[in-house]
Amino acid sequence: MIQQIKSYEELEEFLNSSLQSHKVLHIYLQNNQIGDEGASGLGFALAKCINLSNLSLFLNGNQIGNESASGLGSALAKCNNLINLTLDFYGNQIGDEGASGLCSALVQCTNLSNLKLFLSNNQIGAMGASGLGSALAKCINLSNLTLCLSGNQIGDEGISGLGCALENCINLSNLTLFLSGNQIGAMGASGIGSALANCNNLSNLTLDLSGNQIGAIGASGLCSALEKCINISNLKLYLQKNQIGDEGASGLGYALAKCINLSNLTLYLRNDQIGDEGASGLVSALVKCTNLSNLTLGLDGNQIGDEGVSCLGSGLAKCIYLSNLTLDLSGNQIGAMGISVLGSALAKCINLSNLTLYLRQDQISDEGASGLGSTLAKCINLSNLTLDLSDNQIGYEGASDLCFCLANCINLSNLTLYYDSFSNYESYVKSKYLKLKRLVIFEIRFYE
């Protein structure tokens, strides 16, 4: 039987409702400035919702402090039937004490299996993160956990404490950790990896460590530990702006190659000082992930040239089971030769049906666009293609040649293109693409 969802956007309306009748409850009070007093009243009411099984509580931007956060946790502890809980405290001031108190109380919700905690920008430090982890480790029935702590100051000590506690969550199968902008270094990254390696039942992991200072050692240490998570099939790693360099990228690839059950991988390494050597090392190892079918690689804003992108393409050509590929190489130093070799390599991915290439702000000319088109024409199973070629040196001639070549993609039904403006030729270029008979969906944008 489908349970009725009750939703409230006004605190008073909820306080005056039939509290014991609620089973599935959504409360939206974000940016309402309810403060500590309002949070106290809310907690008092929630404690009476003894039949609650599903609760989503959005309190972001409400000037809530540590005492009120702890009080809300104590109130929720009385909701013994809670199975699914989402708490959004983004942008308050709960601090270490509030974070620890909130989760210490939640330990008493013994039936919790799905928990989402959004605690970004809350002045939480190492002590709060460690206390948070210690409390969560006692939630023995947790199978799905999302924990967002971005924009705090947890540092190496905090993430290590969090990780050591999480390894005791033995039933976790799905884990999402957002830890960007937290002053985490190599030691912290390696520590969280080692801890997660003991979560033997993990099959889906999302880990965001962007905007920290993990460096090459931290990136390699993180993945060397994660390779022990033998059951992971879906992995998302956000490591952009961490200065991992060529050494870190190569070490990352070497470690990921041992994750033999990976079928879906998302890896963002934007602005990480990676050059040709790093790109080559990364992909030469990834080809050993023989079960990869879905791959997203974000390598934009690095220093990869023609040599690096050629090696990248050669490696991807060996991923024979790839069906969905998203590759962002924007803002590198890739020219006509590199892009043509990349296209030739991708043509060997015989199962590729969905391809997205972001190549803006590179050094691609008309020759490069033509070369790319002639090679992509050999991707006989392509049905969906997105190409961002804006902010290059491609003119009317290159765009026209690309169109002519894509006409040979016999299964292409969806095409999205991004170009620079061609002045008076835009309508003419667009009309050429519209003549591609097999297209069902077509979009083209021109940027000034």
Image (spheres, grey):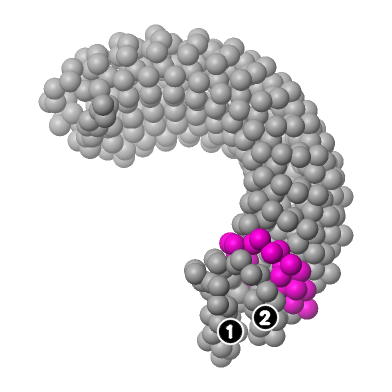
The residue carrying pointer 1 sits among few (fewer than 14), some (14 to 19) or many (20 or more) residues within 10 Å by Cα, namely: few
Is 98 located above or below residue 253 in the figure?
Answer: above
Callout 1–callout 2 Cβ contact below 8 Å: yes
Q: Is residue 274 visible?
A: no
The amino acid beneath tag 1 is Lys
Residue 303's disc number: none
Does 293 sit left or right of 306 as displayed?
left
The span shown in magenta is 367-392
Residue at the spot 70% in from the left edge and 42% down from the top edge: 292
Residue 432's disc number: 1
Residue 12 percent coordinates (x, y): 16, 30
Identify the residue position indicated by label 2 in the image.
Answer: 404
Residue at the spot 28% in from the left edge and 32% down from the top edge: 26
Q: Is residue 103 magenta?
A: no
Q: Which structural element holds mark 1?
A: helix
Q: Which structural element holds mark 2?
A: helix
Q: Quadrant of residue 360?
A: bottom right
